[in-house]
Image (tube, rainbow, N blue to C red):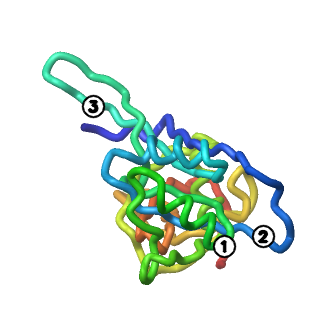
Amino acid sequence: MTHTGEAAHFRQHSFHSRPESPAEQQYWFAVQTKAKHERRVAAELEEKGVVVFLPLFTEVHQWSDRKRKVEIPLFDTYLFVRVGEDRETRVTVLQTNGVFRFVGSRGAGVVIPDEQVEAIRAIVSNNIPFVPYPFLGVGKKVRIRGGSLEGLQGVVLSINGDRSLIVSVESIQKSIAIRISGYQLEAA
């Protein structure tokens, strides 16, 4: 199995059962699912009117007689939902087949800052080559200046001699790495 990382895709559909009012502020949360059920859970949540973000990437799988490109979830057993803090919506999410829990203390869920989810969406939607990377909690935080990734924040590292930006979603402790040669950086 090899990563191509070249054809990254994302899935996000916005279906609201009713318009969001100012009193119904919505936030990003991570939801843990059964293994290999991420797409099924995303489809069922979308049918229920929940906004879902399931980032996918392409991997080349090799069998003895052939190779095939396969789209798989970037963060296995996790997807993101944009919901309010009302009990009814949370119960709807939790009653979805294949959902274990909201990620956070006591299963209540922790709000994921919009900029963390938007950073992943920007990388995936702009087809920026990336690879999954172990989560990093420390390091120098920087922000990209200019270009299609303007404002994107992450941690700078050197990977195999190349400067890379590590973008993390802290609540699920998952990260991805992108090469940043040619981008201007500033301290975040």
Query: Do the residues under discs 1 and 2 have CB atoms within 8 angstroms?
Result: yes
Residue under numbered circle 1: 86
Q: Quadrant of residue 64?
A: top left
- In this rendering, the answer to whether 102 lies above or below 162 is below
Q: Position of residue 85 (x, y in %)?
A: 65, 74
SS for dot 2? loop
Left-right relation of 136 to 66: right
Which residue is labeled 3 in the image?
61
Q: Is residue 139 above or below residue 157?
A: below
Residue 152 percent location from the top left of the image: 66, 63
Amino acid type for the residue under numbered disc 1: Asp
Disc number lying in front (3 or 1): 1
Q: Tell me the crowding category of disc 3: few under 14, some 14 to 19, or many 20 or more residues within 10 angstroms, Cα based.
A: few
Provide the secondary structure element on which disc 3 rests. Answer: strand
Q: Earlier in the sequence, mark 1 or mark 2?
A: 2
Chain-order first, disc 2 or disc 3: 2
Quadrant that contains the C terminus: bottom right
Q: Quadrant of residue 25?
A: bottom right
| Residue marked by disc 2 | 24
Q: Nearer the viewer, residue 158 or 103?
A: 103
Q: Is residue 170 left or right of residue 87?
A: left
Residues at marks 1 and 2, CA–CA distance in whole angstroms: 8 Å
The circle on residue 56 is none
